Image: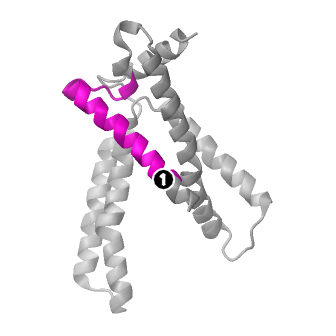
């Protein structure tokens, strides 16, 4: 019940910030929407308040994302073993360290969305339906194999294009520099 409420709360916050940002700034909305509220380098109380709300949302969402990933890693690496804090703590720290490294090194979050879209959409649109149908029918058909191969091929081609661009500068890459400058301007 608590996780459902946290998910609904974080969804509502993200949706309202995004909706009002697009309504107010239209096509000139920056990748980091909070930078749009930072007019001419002047920080406002509204910007600080929205930043606080977004920071709270991220704190609410982190456990919701870490828990299923940690359970999956634990089940894949240590199948059938009972819960252990000796695994729980290193797995959690490793997940947080990887997430922090990605957050610090990748300048544009849009690139992360590209990667998750190329992989997640392939699983949801091509592989999982075929696996579910094969499980229900208890057989594997040629058409299911073709769909899986085509979906995987599209994903590989997308990743082939996306991955080299992860660490290159884009026209919007100054958003990170603006955000860094903005956060230091608060002091």
Nearer to me, 156 or 47: 47
Which residue is located at x 50 percent, y 59 percent?
4
In the rendered image, residue 16 lying in the magenta stretch gets the answer yes
Locate residue 148 relative to residue 7 in the image: left or right: left
Residue 5, position in %: x, y?
A: 51, 55
Task: For residue 97, say whether it is visible.
Answer: yes
As drawn, the residue found furthest toward the bottom would be 138
**Residue 80 sits above or below residue 105 on the image:** below
Mark 1: secondary structure: helix
Determine which quarter of the picture holds residue 131: bottom left
Q: For the magenta stretch, what is the residue range?
A: 6-34
Which residue is located at x 40 percent, y 25 percent?
34
Nearer to me, 141 or 50: 50
Magenta part mainly helix, strand or loop?
helix
Task: For residue 163, say whether it is visible.
Answer: no
Locate residue 65 relative to residue 23 in the image: left or right: right
Q: Which residue is mark 1?
A: 7
Residue 182, position in %: x, y?
A: 47, 14
Determine which quarter of the picture holds residue 126: bottom left
For the C terminus, the quadrant is top right
For the N terminus, the quadrant is bottom right
Nearer to me, 167 or 90: 90
Number of numbered discs on residues = 1
């Amino acid at each position: 019940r608590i996780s459902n409420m946290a998910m609904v709360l974080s969804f509502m916050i993200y949706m309202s910030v995004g909706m009002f940002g697009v309504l107010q700034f239209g096509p000139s909305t920056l990748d980091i929407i909070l930078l749009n509220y930072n007019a001419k380098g002047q920080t406002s109380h509204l910007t600080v308040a929205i930043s606080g709300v977004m920071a709270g949302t991220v704190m609410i969402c982190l456990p919701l994302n870490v828990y299923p990933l940690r359970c999956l890693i634990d089940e894949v690496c240590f199948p059938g073993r009972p819960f252990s804090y000796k695994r729980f703590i290193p797995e959690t720290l490793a997940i947080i360290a990887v997430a922090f490294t990605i957050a610090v090194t990748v300048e544009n979050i849009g690139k992360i969305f590209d990667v998750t879209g190329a992989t997640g959409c392939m699983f949801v649109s091509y592989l999982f339906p075929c696996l579910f149908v094969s499980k229900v029918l208890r057989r594997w058909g040629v058409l299911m194999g073709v769909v899986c191969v085509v979906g995987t091929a599209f994903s590989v081609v997308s990743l082939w294009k996306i991955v080299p661009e992860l660490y290159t500068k884009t026209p919007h890459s100054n958003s990170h520099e603006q955000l860094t400058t903005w956060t230091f301007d608060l002091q």
